[in-house]
Image (cartoon, helix red, strand yellow):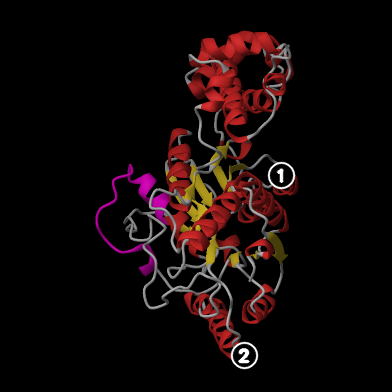
Amino acid sequence: MKTDEQTVAIAFDLNFRHAAEIFSGASDYLAEAHLDWQLMPLNFGFETRLMELARSGQLAGALGTFVSDGWVRGLLETGVPAINMFNFSKIGIVPTVSPDDYATGEAAAEHLRAQGAQRFAFLGADGVYYTRLREAGFRAGLADGNPPHGKDVAGVGSLPKDVAERGTRFDRMAESIPKVESASRVRYNTGTPPPPLCSHDAMPIVSMEIELFRPGPTLSDQLDALKGSSELIGIFCSNDLCARELITLARHKGIRCGKDILVVGVDNDPSESIFAGIGISSFKQPIRETGYLAAKALHETITNGRISIDLQLQTPTQLIPRESSLASNRARIGQQAANYLQENLSDPDLDAAAIARRVGVSRRSLELAINEQFKSSPYQMLAKARLQLAQQLLRTTRLPIMQVGTRCGYPEAHHFSAWFKKQSGVAPKVYREGQSPLLS
């Protein structure tokens, strides 16, 4: 394949909203690296089409959410390098770029403990690797982050029959399509897998007593067992869909979310909060960053035959606390104020008084709530949030400095530059010139 006509497939069929962000992140890297790849999105049922393209020699590489090492091995044998995205399955034969699912579980445990939960449960579907990682991290977080040496995460349970059969079916599919020699320069030695790309692959499951809930018909009976408990129960759900199912069912049983149970999910999907009738505390996943990093890893693989040892392939998630996991009234006021602050950083008139009016409390009540929830003051929170946004925009975009200032609540360029230099010690232009490109 000619280097000026490289086609790269992006194969992702789990979430349309995420697919768009992945494509956007990969496109950002292509623009930054001055690559002329043609990105080809493949959605539901991509496996057959992807393998056909690989056998025909039309692909320079593939980014995807793959189901098994066996299927990926068939792809690699066509000479098409690949990068796996997300921990849907445990993939060891190629690098995996994903949010840090284990650390997400740890952070969920830390948050629920901080909100006063005394008893804990985990809700997630069997058969998905990220569910195991999140549960393992949750257990570790509840054990104060000091996991003993023990059983490997991958040794806990096994893929259910339907998922395992799906992988076997794709393996057979890979073998059934006639092979066409690829013109791609990169070849994998499929007998020598790349080094481990997920630092949590060998992390042990902590022997921490938590209740395991599963979505579906049995969840109702499991919730019945919680009724009448005098303990505040913290429940970490592997995604927002599970969280919504739990909250809705609990409400029908008279179990109050935020009072009897505290619930945290993953995905930060606003539609699930709407359907649940309450704001779901959730981890925002770095989907765009994952697409960016996956494209960078594939580029390094195509160019060098391997990725650089210092390329960070796991990206941190961010917890957005809402009513579902905030036990006290002050905590809810503090978080409501923080959310409003984050959404209105471009407002030059935003200050403690404006936030207090929006939340519907006195300025003193706001200050007490923010101090209790964040150990900070409204002024400090606002300054820190604006500085973080400014630094992020300077690092990751080519926006003119005046536009960066406007987005941070400083429409006058000279005022923004003076404020930024006072906060960070250098002028915005100097800061931008001293920073590496996005996620490099």
Q: Is residue 105 magenta?
A: no
Q: Position of residue 232 (x, y in %)?
A: 48, 40
Type of the residue with mark 1: Pro
SS of the residue at dot 2? loop
In the rendered structure, does residue 138 fall within the stretch colored magenta? yes
Mark 1 lies on a secondary structure that is: helix
Q: Which residues are magenta?
A: 136-155
Residue type at the position of mark 2 = Pro
Chain-order first, disc 1 or disc 2: 2
Numbered mark located on residue 270 in the image: 1
Residue 172, by quadrant, is bottom right
Q: Is residue 410 above or below residue 314?
A: above
Distance from the alpha carbon under mark 1 to that under mark 2: 45 Å
In the rendering, at what x and y percent does residue 253 appear? 64, 52
Q: Nearer the viewer, residue 110 or 57?
A: 57
Where is residue 283 shown, x and y percent of the image? 57, 44
Where's residue 66, x and y in %?
56, 69
**Nearer to the camera, 343 or 211:** 343
Q: Quadrant of residue 32?
A: top right
Residue 365 visible to the viewer: no
Q: Residue at x 51, y 31 (%)?
A: 435
In which quadrant will I find the N terminus? bottom right
Mark 2: few/some/many CA within 10 Å (<14, 14-19, 20+): few
Which residue is nearer to you in this view: 75 or 278?
Answer: 75
Mark 1 and mark 2 in contact? Answer it, CB < 8 Å.
Answer: no
Residue at image mark 2: 178
